[in-house]
Image: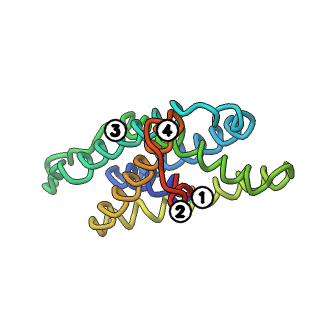
Amino acid sequence: MAADNAIIIGMVASNFAPKHRKQIILWGVFAAFLFRVIFAFSATYLFQFAFIKLIGGVLLLWIVNGLRQDLFDTKKIKSPTKQSKEPSFMSGVYKVLIADITISFDNVLGVAGAAKDHYFLLIFGLFLSVVLIGVAASYFAKYIKDHQWVGYVGLAVILLIAIQLIISGLIGYGVITINEPFASWF
């Protein structure tokens, strides 16, 4: 459940110097924990609204476009006399926060559904997912920096999640219907 958050945080952080990379990952992990706690208490209520899924999907599309620009359109200058052109630190933090809001909601729904009425399992599952985000995001940030093709795979994963959220929201509004074998995907 934490892999999608870790991929996004790692992709955003990979564009920054190691000092800022660690800070963005810390912000992402803290935000993931905070949003998971908030959503854990309000998940059943918020899940009733299809527009939440639509907004989340659109926000993820915005994040995919921003990450695509940051990862692949920015030319990095390697001259020691010139500074590299890295995106602003705050833009990285904003992207991570928006991604955390969007993805934490469906992660909480998955953990809450698995835990049912066992609140200890719910808290343990949320804590475990946040720890996994922190560990995996650091790994993804370094790996994406070294292997740019992984960034394309990450963008595809995030795009798939965005499309699933949008389709799920449209199903909630009755705009489209999905055949029964594919309904579990949304």
Identify the residue under disc 2: 181
Q: Earlier in the sequence, mark 4 or mark 2?
A: 4
82 horizontally vs 92: left or right: left
Between disc 3 and disc 4, the foreground one is 4
Amino acid type at mark 2: Pro
120 horizontally vs 41: left or right: right
Q: Say which mark, if any, is on residue 169.
A: 4
Residue 23: percent from left, percent from top: 48, 45
- For the residue pair 34 and 85, the one nearer the viewer reads as 34
Q: Earlier in the sequence, mark 3 or mark 1?
A: 1
Q: Earlier in the sequence, mark 2 or mark 3?
A: 3
Q: Say which mark, if any, is on residue 1.
A: 1
At 48% from the left edge and 51% from the top edge, which residue is drawn?
178
Amino acid type at mark 3: Trp
> Label 2: how many residues lie within 10 Å, few (<14), some (14-19) or many (20+)?
few
> Label 1: how many residues lie within 10 Å, few (<14), some (14-19) or many (20+)?
some
Identify the residue under disc 3: 62
Q: CA distance from mark 4 to mark 2?
A: 18 Å
Q: CA distance from mark 3 to mark 1?
A: 22 Å
Between disc 2 and disc 1, the foreground one is 2
Residue 135: percent from left, percent from top: 56, 62
Q: CA distance from mark 2 to mark 1?
A: 22 Å
Amino acid type at mark 1: Met
Q: Are marks 3 and 4 in contact (CB under 8 Å)?
A: no
